């Protein structure tokens, strides 16, 4: 099976090169991997001690940050190497301040795995939540390098638990320890004979709790808000925006909107702005403008949404009308804000829990959105009640990082 897998990987490496000619994202995927080994050779010497973290994309990287921070304290002489599989993670966080070296993960061929590990020669390795690359994992096992899965989550429909899943189950045997998010993940692994499992919870809670300790002030947001009830829309997609624009254009409520779309391409941003009949300004147009005069602020940049949530009275988190579903709701939740999402949230345990606890409200259509916004805008007590549910939920679920670090120290 591994032989067949390696053939498929070699074929895939050629196919993506062809697709890169037509797809900008795949071009980033291909071009970004061309200089990985050169970068590693230049930044890591044979004498360096390193610790490697692998994240599929942006969400997993954010999930790993609390552990990276503690690792840097516990192992101050080790360089931190971070790898990404996806351009949507690497391109946003390639200049992060926590890692000493950040690169794409070369495709999972046997030669790539051998060369990569020879160059970084890690003392410890952490895979975050997902992704199980057989050649990398096999080489780690051969080299007897301790390898951990953190914030892991397993479901019955994954290949590991199917009759044909022996190849994938073998990949799991290479891990020294699994830190999983919930009881069901632990039970699934135990059914396969793995007892090196601990329920740690989700390190994202530690990540968002730490946000409260930093300076989240943005003077231009304070000026725009101007003591007015404000709805912050995070990571919106066109299906979200259609409903939101309809509401914005027809409402008579005294409310302002800050919209931070998932896609900030100029054409889509301009189309969104043109669809709104109320006074609207872009982040990129804010210089020398009196933002308090505007009703709508569209954020056509990245990296400041978390701070913007701190000014929200209500949050709408996008993605819930698509697949796999809603984006990160924990960032607004940590600020104690009621949250509104679309109908597709079942893949995300925190969203399921907060909808059940009624801190988060799921809407399915225009009528639901209109009624939900009107109710939250007009009733400050309901906003505070639901916001309190959200912030309490986050605080009650923190601590995963300490569980992980304690176990690592004992190993």
Image (tube, helix red, strand yellow):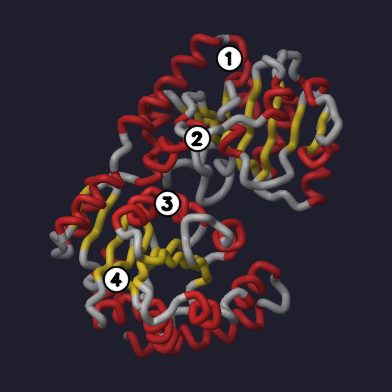
Q: Earlier in the sequence, mark 3 or mark 1?
A: 3
- Mark 2 Cα within 10 Å, few/some/many (few <14, many 20+)? few
Q: Residue at x 40, y 77 (%)?
A: 120
**Distance between mark 1 and mark 4 Cα atoms:** 54 Å
Q: Earlier in the sequence, mark 3 or mark 2?
A: 3
What residue would you read off at disc 2? 214
Q: Residue at x 40, y 22 (%)?
A: 389
**Distance between mark 4 and mark 2 Cα atoms:** 31 Å
Q: Earlier in the sequence, mark 4 or mark 2?
A: 4
Image quadrant in which the N terminus is located: bottom left
Q: Residue at x 29, y 77 (%)?
A: 140
- Residue 234 locus on image (x, y percent): 61, 38
Q: Earlier in the sequence, mark 3 or mark 4?
A: 3
**Secondary element type, mark 1:** helix
Observer-nearest of 44 and 329: 44
- Residue 378 locus on image (x, y percent): 61, 10
- Mark 3 Cα within 10 Å, few/some/many (few <14, many 20+)? some
Residue 204, picture quadrant = top left
**Secondary element type, mark 3:** helix
**Distance between mark 3 and mark 2 Cα atoms:** 15 Å
- Mark 4 Cα within 10 Å, few/some/many (few <14, many 20+)? some
What residue would you read off at disc 3? 65
Left or right: 255 as drawn, with respect to 183: right
**Distance between mark 3 and mark 1 Cα atoms:** 37 Å
What residue would you read off at disc 1? 375
């Amino acid at each position: 099976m591994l032989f067949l897998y390696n053939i498929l990987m070699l074929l895939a490496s050629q196919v993506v090169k062809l697709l890169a000619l037509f797809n900008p994202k795949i071009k980033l995927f291909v071009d970004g991997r061309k200089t990985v080994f050169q970068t590693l050779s230049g930044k890591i010497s044979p004498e360096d001690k390193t610790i490697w973290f692998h994240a599929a994309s942006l969400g997993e990287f954010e999930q790993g940050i609390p552990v990276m921070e503690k690792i840097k304290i516990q192992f101050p002489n080790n360089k931190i190497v971070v790898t990404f599989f996806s351009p949507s993670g690497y391109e946003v966080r390639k200049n992060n301040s926590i890692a000493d070296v950040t690169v794409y993960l070369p495709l999972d061929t046997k030669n790539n795995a051998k060369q990569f590990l020879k160059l970084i020669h890690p003392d410890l390795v952490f895979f975050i939540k997902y992704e199980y690359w057989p050649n990398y994992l096999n080489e780690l096992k051969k080299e007897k390098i301790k390898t951990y899965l953190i914030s892991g989550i397993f479901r019955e429909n994954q290949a590991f638990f199917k009759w044909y899943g022996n190849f994938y189950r073998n990949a799991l045997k290479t891990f020294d320890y699994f830190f999983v998010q919930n009881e069901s993940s632990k039970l699934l692994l135990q059914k396969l004979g793995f007892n090196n499992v601990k329920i740690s919870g989700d390190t994202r809670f530690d990540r968002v709790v730490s946000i409260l300790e930093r300076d989240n002030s943005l003077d231009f947001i304070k000026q725009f808000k101007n003591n007015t009830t404000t709805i912050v829309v995070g990571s919106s997609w066109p299906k979200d925006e259609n409903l939101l624009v309809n509401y914005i254009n027809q409402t008579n409520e005294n409310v302002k909107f800050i919209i931070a779309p998932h896609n900030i391409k100029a054409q889509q941003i301009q189309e969104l702005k043109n669809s709104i009949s109320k006074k609207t300004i872009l982040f990129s147009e804010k210089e020398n403008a009196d933002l308090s005069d505007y009703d709508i602020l569209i954020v056509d940049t990245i990296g400041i949404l978390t701070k913007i949530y701190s000014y929200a009275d209500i949050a709408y988190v996008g993605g819930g009308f698509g697949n796999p579903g809603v984006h990160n709701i924990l960032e607004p939740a940590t600020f104690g804000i009621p949250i509104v999402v679309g109908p597709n949230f079942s893949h995300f345990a925190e969203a399921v829990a907060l909808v059940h606890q009624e801190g988060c409200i799921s809407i399915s259509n225009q009528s639901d959105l209109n009624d939900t916004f009107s109710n939250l805008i007009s009733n400050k007590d309901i906003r505070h009640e639901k916001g309190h549910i959200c912030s309490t939920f986050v605080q009650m679920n923190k601590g995963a990082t300490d569980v992980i670090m304690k176990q690592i120290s004992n190993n």
